[in-house]
């Protein structure tokens, strides 16, 4: 009898993930993220060896982060959509449309009469509006996210081209005063660009939202098992709309960062952002099937890509080589994750 | 009763597994399993959830490679390292979760992987002909080979799966809980097919939770417990049920239904009132009143509309006629959110796909319907969530203890407790339970029954749907019998017996 009890206890221990330190750690999000940190550290070592001081300088670190900021903000939004079981291919096009719309505004008389924050508001509203359209048609029109956002990708960029007449709109080109906008975004706080701070703030808000709020819990539920979420009383359709609005807002913020950095709005802005963002999210350990993912992982994914880009540039390697390498990294990361995932699900 | 000889003593078994070990990281799923199956016998494999039955059949069908032990096939040592090798040897498996391609038609599914073809071109007419023969042999000539499989009921999908097994030269057929998706009549048909196969010298491994079925169809029994064979080759005829339960659980228990509340006519007032509820093409004119503290059972065949009635009451399906009211307040049609706010909870039939977030922690599964209560301005108090969840799981004796483990580490019975805890936490007024003991092992069943009764005693109005008539009769105070979308009978559970209900669901006759 006591032998039996011992067996049962052992079985209970064995099936308990918390009791398998090494493997369990790799399966947890913390462990996976630790793996990403190690990868990032290795990449930095490569950078330091190949480019020396040019890589390790503080200035360069800021360059990397500046590079990461725009795509990073988009990726945070993308993380939510993907955890919620969707995908958004239109983020790049939304960035373009937002940038064009808010710079059009800035070049018109209207801008003279209103505060520069109007631009900020417009960019975010345009992003939210596109997201709302995506969300409503996906949730209530039952259009597959892939198709709906593909359509938005085409339409939003098309609209951006119409509004801008395919011309690059230079901020304040018509003599309007946009100094307030420029001053705000080109400022440094504690020696760090505002754009980097904005990325950091968006990431922190994203983390809190995902891990500490009902919104985050619902996102995981909706993505992990939509039927169970629905039968548990969660309004899955409404939540889906929120998710696409959220990623749209992120795209709007990214558009502002891009406008500030380039001082232009253009229908070519944000080209292929959707792929960079999805790549960063996937590298960060978020499942494309939904239901699981972390903000920290996404941030690390973004940093890994921007650091790599930086190293390639410092070593005068071509953009093509960079792309080739990026592809290889994505495949390697996903293969690794699948291994871990398959180990954790077999019983 | 089986009329068949189970092979002469000393006859060489078709399959002999010895000391099979299979380890997964952290779990030894199989820890020395012995199993021998003879041609022409129906060999029953029983054991509680997690005993290793599923892993064992996956080893047999080539999905898992064993870490130890030997498998002999026809007396020679053999390897079943890939599904293709297993299939070549003539092993066919009908899984619990059917492995059909929903968008292909019946014939395409049956011949998937071994299409009837000439020089690479599929030979449709011959395929259809052969499928028609197979389906007729399986007692379902009415299924058209051109029907899209996803449109068929689960019971018919299982028939298609069987046809696929028969379309190959099958020597060993493994059936994993085949009766779970079947009603009584279908089970009778299934048993006829199994007997035919056994008579044709096919070996059948039959896995089931239902001991009465094993009595009816089995020749010999192997009992698994905690990944080990605790008894093998028991003759069905000579082994008492109590002995089997003892072997499976290490305890001696029967299905014990908790006593009904003694209150009789002075139960609480009506809580759930359903009037003239209908769903176009599925059921019509359902009237149902459940009072506080009462358990009402819905009996009927699979496909009679029982689950649909529950889902419509819950708002998961939009009613075409009629009303649902809780405490006198009429609910909005087709709104789960409204139903939940009014105090209705549903434990759906498919626990894993409809109720649980399997990868998520137990406590998150429990609080998912009450999240707002733990939140201030949207921020969750997770410590409080865990505390309340732990209180509940402890009081319900969910094992193993601990609310931060993922829901998929629990057995079926304990998962069901987690779903019940979710609604318990919400203090719901009405609880709708669809097949509450599906996939729950013998030992945990009584606990679930006890729990349901104690919920009722606290004043919850409970509606239970079950395919097992004895469960409905044993658990409920009042029974409604549903047949082809209509309530054909309503009475106190004690006023009708199993044969009476059976008669009603099959024939629609009022018992004499």
Image (spheres, coloured by chain):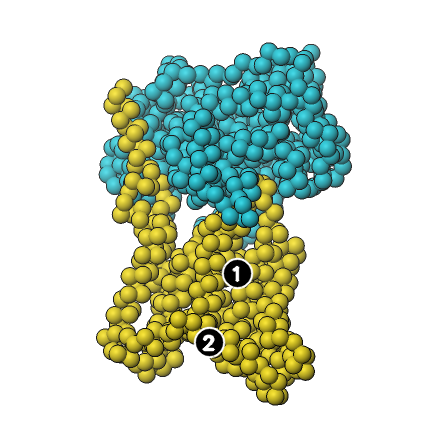
Chain colours: A yellow, B cyan
Rendered residue at 56%/60% (across/down)? A246
Rendered residue at 33%/38% (across/down)? A16
Q: Position of residue B32 (x, y in %)?
A: 26, 32
What secondary structure is found at the residue carrying circle 1? Answer: loop
Relative side of B264 to A11, left or right: right
Mark 2, residue position? A187
Mark 1, residue position? A87
Dot 2 crowding, Cα within 10 Å, few <14, some 14–19, many 20+: few
What secondary structure is found at the residue carrying circle 2? Answer: loop
Q: Quadrant of residue A145?
A: bottom right
Numbered disc 1: what chain?
A
Q: Which mark is residue A256?
A: none
Relative side of B165 to B488, left or right: left
Q: Nearer the viewer, residue B159 or B307?
A: B307
Q: Earlier in the sequence, mark 1 or mark 2?
A: 1
Q: Where is A49 relative to B469, above or below?
A: below
The C terminus of chain B appears in which quarter of the rendering?
top right
Distance from the alpha carbon under mark 1 to that under mark 2: 34 Å
Q: Where is A38 relative to B24, above or below?
A: below
Asked whether residue B421 is in view, the answer is yes
Q: Position of residue B49 (x, y in %)?
A: 40, 31
**Mark 1–mark 2 contact, CB under 8 Å?**
no
Rendered residue at 32%/83% (across/down)? A316
Please state which of the two labelled residues, at mark 1 or mark 2, is closer to the viewer.
2
Rendered residue at 46%/34% (across/down)? B389
Q: Position of residue A261 (x, y in %)?
A: 48, 79
């Amino acid at each position: 009898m006591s032998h039996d009890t011992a067996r049962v206890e052992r079985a209970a221990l064995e099936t308990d993930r918390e009791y398998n330190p090494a493997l369990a750690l790799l399966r947890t999000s913390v462990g996976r993220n630790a793996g990403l940190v190690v990868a990032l550290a290795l990449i930095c070592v490569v950078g330091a060896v190949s480019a020396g001081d040019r890589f390790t300088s503080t200035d360069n670190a800021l360059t990397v982060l500046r590079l990461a900021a725009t795509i990073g903000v988009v990726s945070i939004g993308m993380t939510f959509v993907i955890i919620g079981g969707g995908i958004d291919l239109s983020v790049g096009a939304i960035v373009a449309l937002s940038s064009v719309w808010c710079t059009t505004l800035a070049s018109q008389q209207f801008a003279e009469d209103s505060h520069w924050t109007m631009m900020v508001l417009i960019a975010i509203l345009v992003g939210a509006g596109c997201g709302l359209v995506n969300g409503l048609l996906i949730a209530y029109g039952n259009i597959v996210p892939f198709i709906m956002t593909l359509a938005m990708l085409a339409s939003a960029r098309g609209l951006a081209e119409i509004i801008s007449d395919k011309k690059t709109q230079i901020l304040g080109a018509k003599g309007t005063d946009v100094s307030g906008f420029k001053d705000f975004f080109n400022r440094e706080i504690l020696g760090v660009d505002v754009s980097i701070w904005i990325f950091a703030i968006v990431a922190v808000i994203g983390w809190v939202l995902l891990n500490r709020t009902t919104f985050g819990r619902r996102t995981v539920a909706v993505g992990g098992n939509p039927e169970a979420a629905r039968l548990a009383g969660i309004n899955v359709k409404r939540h889906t709309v929120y998710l696409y609005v959220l990623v749209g807002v992120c795209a709007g913020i990214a558009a502002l960062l891009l406008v500030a950095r380039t001082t232009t709005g253009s229908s070519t802005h944000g080209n292929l952002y959707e792929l960079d963002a999805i790549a960063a999210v996937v590298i960060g350990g978020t499942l494309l099937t939904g239901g699981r993912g972390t903000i920290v992982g996404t941030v690390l994914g973004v940093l890994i890509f921007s650091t790599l880009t930086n190293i390639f540039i410092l070593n005068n390697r071509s953009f093509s080589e960079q792309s080739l390498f990026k592809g290889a990294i994505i495949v390697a990361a996903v293969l690794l994750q699948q291994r871990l995932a398959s180990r954790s699900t077999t019983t | 009763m089986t009329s068949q000889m189970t092979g002469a003593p000393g006859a060489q078994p078709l399959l002999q597994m010895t000391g099979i070990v299979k380890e997964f990281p952290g779990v030894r799923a199989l820890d020395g399993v012995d199993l021998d199956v003879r041609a022409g016998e129906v060999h029953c494999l029983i054991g509680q959830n997690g005993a290793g039955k599923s892993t064992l059949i996956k080893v047999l069908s080539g999905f898992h490679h064993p870490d130890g032990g030997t498998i002999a096939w026809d007396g020679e040592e053999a390897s079943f390292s890939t599904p293709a090798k297993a299939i070549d040897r003539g092993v066919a498996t009908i899984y619990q979760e059917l492995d059909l391609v929903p968008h292909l038609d019946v014939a395409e599914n049956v011949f998937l992987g071994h299409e009837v073809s000439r020089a690479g071109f599929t030979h449709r007419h011959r395929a259809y002909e052969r499928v028609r023969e197979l389906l007729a042999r399986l007692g379902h000539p009415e299924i058209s080979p051109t029907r899209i499989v996803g449109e068929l009921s689960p019971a018919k999908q299982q028939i298609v799966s069987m046809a696929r097994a028969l379309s190959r030269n099958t020597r060993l057929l493994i059936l994993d809980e085949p009766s779970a998706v079947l009603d009584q009549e279908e089970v009778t048909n299934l048993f006829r097919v199994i007997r035919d196969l056994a008579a044709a010298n096919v070996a059948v491994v039959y896995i089931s939770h239902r001991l009465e079925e094993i009595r009816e169809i089995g020749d010999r029994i192997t009992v698994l417990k905690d990944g080990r064979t605790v008894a093998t080759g028991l003759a069905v005829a000579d082994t008492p049920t109590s002995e089997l339960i003892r072997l499976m659980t290490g305890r001696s228990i029967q299905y014990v239904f908790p006593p009904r509340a003694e209150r009789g006519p002075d139960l609480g007032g009506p809580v759930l009132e359903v009037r003239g509820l209908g769903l176009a093409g599925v059921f019509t004119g359902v009237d149902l009143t459940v009072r506080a503290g009462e358990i009402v059972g819905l009996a009927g065949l699979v496909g009679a509309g029982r689950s649909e009635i529950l889902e419509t009451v819950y708002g998961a399906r939009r009613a075409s006629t009629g009303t649902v009211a809780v405490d006198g307040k009429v609910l909005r049609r087709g709104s789960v959110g409204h139903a939940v706010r009014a105090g209705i909870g549903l434990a759906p039939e498919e626990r894993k796909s409809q109720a649980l977030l399997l990868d998520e922690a137990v406590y998150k599964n429990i609080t998912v319907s009450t999240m707002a209560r733990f939140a201030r301005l949207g921020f969750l108090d997770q410590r409080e969530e865990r505390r309340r969840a732990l209180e509940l799981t402890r009081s319900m004796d969910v094992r193993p203890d601990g609310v931060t483990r993922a829901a998929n580490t629990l057995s079926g019975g304990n998962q069901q407790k987690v779903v019940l805890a979710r609604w318990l936490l919400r203090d719901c007024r009405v609880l709708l339970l669809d097949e509450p003991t599906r996939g729950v092992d013998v030992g945990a069943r009584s606990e679930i029954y006890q729990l349901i009764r104690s919920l009722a005693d606290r004043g919850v109005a409970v509606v239970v749907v079950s395919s097992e008539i004895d469960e409905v009769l044993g658990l409920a105070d009042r029974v409604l019998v549903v047949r082809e979308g209509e309530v054909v009978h309503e009475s106190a559970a004690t006023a009708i017996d199993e044969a009476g209900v059976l008669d009603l669901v099959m024939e629609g006759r009022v018992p004499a």
